Image (cartoon, helix red, strand yellow):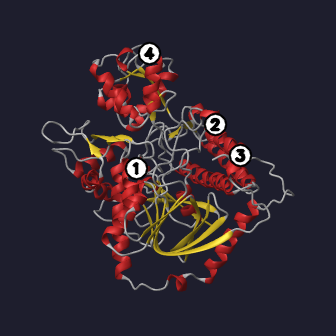
Amino acid sequence: MEKGDYDTIMGKKLERKKIETDVLIIGGGTAGCYAALTISRKSNLRVWIAEKANIKRSGCLAAGVNAINAYITKGRKPEDYVDYATKDAAGIVRHDLLLTAAEHFNETTADMERLGLVILKDENGDYVARGNRNIKINGENFKPILAKAVAEAKNVTIQNQVNITDLLVDENRVYGAVGFSVKENVCYEIHARAVLVATGGAAGLYKPNNPGFSRHKMWYPPFNTGAGYAMGIKSGAEMTSFEMRFIALRCKDTIAPTGTIAQGVSAKQVNARGFVYEDKYGLTTSERVYGTVRENQLGNGPCYLKTTSIKKEQDEELLKAYLNMAPSQTLKWIESGKNPSEQDVEIEGTEPYIVGGHTASGYWVNTKRETTIHMLYAAGDVAGGCPQKYVTGALAEGELAADDIVEKLTRDADTEIEKTIAAKLQNDVETIFASYEKILNTNGETKNLYAMEELEEAMQKVMDEYAGGISTNYQFNEKQLALAEEKIEKLTVLANEVTAENMHELLFAYELKERLIVCKSLIAHLKARKETRWHSFNENLDYPDTDENYYKYVNSKLENGEIKIIFRDIVKGAEYEHQN
């Protein structure tokens, strides 16, 4: 939308709407949509989905995907996937979460095929595998297929272009949430018996590979700001493993996925001298990034995926595969006049992200995906403890959370939600609505001294230089983290003074605030793990080795405005329940 498409509303009061539902789902991505579909199929509960964009193309599946990256292929079992993910994360995982997700990978895949997803099959009618854990699909329309099924589901209301900012929590139980329309001059008070957060992870915390007008060209959706994390942190929910950042190894400039090349045509990582370095550093996700960084530091760059050894017929396979998810890479090959078999693909690491679908960062949940706040659930990238879950893991967690919500809400008495909202929460609602209007109602007297974009760039510069971004080869030390903490705190104060002319700008104001909250938690986690367990992901120069004293989860909780670190032992049991 152009700025002119939005009315300026300075000096006006926002229209207030009150919504009552059984289940509120915040975020209409993969996990949120599948949770809604599951609840609709298994109950008569009312579901209200709040999505700040449009569920047809929102979330990580917006542009499509060319493979199911988490699937139990023939001859494998769910426990094998648990072993793989555990090794890749150096043991800092929740085995109960991994196993329950893996047990649902194939079931959810079959369901998506019934809904219309095209999965490639061989001459025997079997799915075409890509490696040990992947199958090939034509997934450009994956999200529209899922969104269509949700739109047709009974008792489900989809509210697009609504941004949720705060949860309504009293005595460690959630009762709903508060937000505003991105386009209309309306704010929402939503009462619900259960709430599922499915807002995805956090991008844009660090200075990106391609700053300026190309800053959107990144690995993770630039619209995922960590909103779900932020609202949980503010409400006192326990978080886990933020220090296990995710840095993707991508094709240079286009930031297109490398897995399709590495797995699809078995291309090796080589340096500029032609040396295959991946065996030297290791093959875990973080080691592949770390090896690339080190080879460049040693003067052996640029680094590549060696595609000049592939067969000519594989060229078309790669060109088509990238059209399903990252067409810019296909265009780059075409514009260069050389196919993959005629030139190696240069690779680089991205800026760090916080994302629970690839690493273990996110809400601390029980096996049913309930957070430490009663009746508040988390699924998909926003849920921690279950790395390498990808699309099918998001589907699985949406289903697992939905099943528990259905079981609890149909078992418990259906009391009027209005009576459960305490007077304290009504005061909270009024305070939040007043904060919206304060940012909007400048009436020309209060000037915005700091533009939101300038503050965002300042935040990214701080994180890049002091908290292990690209410019420092992802490395940091305790002194740098202390400076990062100090500077982020100052930016947070400045962010409280931003103003907006319309609802769209109000969205940007809250996205900035959300990112700063996540940055604060991330820095606390990086400081707490005094070791280097995952090269690049947490490259602590003061503690360059692995320390088995930190073979545990680094968790956190906001108490009295400060991040309190909690160390928890590794969960070994088949099912975990919170003790609070």
Which mark is in front, 2 or 1?
Answer: 1
Res. 65 image quadrant? top left
Placement of 424 over or under 30, stated as above or below: below
Amino acid carrying label 3: it is Leu
Q: Earlier in the sequence, mark 4 or mark 3?
A: 4
Q: Earlier in the sequence, mark 4 or mark 2?
A: 4
Q: Residue at x 61, y 77 (%)?
A: 425
Placement of 207 over or under 152, stated as above or below: above
Q: How many neighbours does mark 4 have within 10 angstroms: few (below 14), some (14-19), or many (20 or more)?
A: few
Res. 318 image quadrant? top left
Left or right: 93 in relation to 558 = left
Which mark is in front, 4 or 3?
Answer: 4
Label at residue 465: 2
Label at residue 337: 4
Q: Earlier in the sequence, mark 1 or mark 4?
A: 1
Q: How many neighbours does mark 3 have within 10 angstroms: few (below 14), some (14-19), or many (20 or more)?
A: some
Q: Which residue is mark 1?
A: 143
> Which element carries disc 2, helix, strand or loop?
helix
Left or right: 64 in relation to 159 = left
Q: Residue at x 45, y 46 (%)?
A: 62
Q: Which residue is mark 3?
A: 455
Amino acid carrying label 1: it is Lys
- Please provide percent x and percent y for residue 250: 45, 32
Which mark is in front, 3 or 2?
Answer: 3
- Please provide percent x and percent y for residue 115: 29, 54
Residue 46 or 283: which is nearer the viewer? Answer: 46
Amino acid carrying label 4: it is Gly
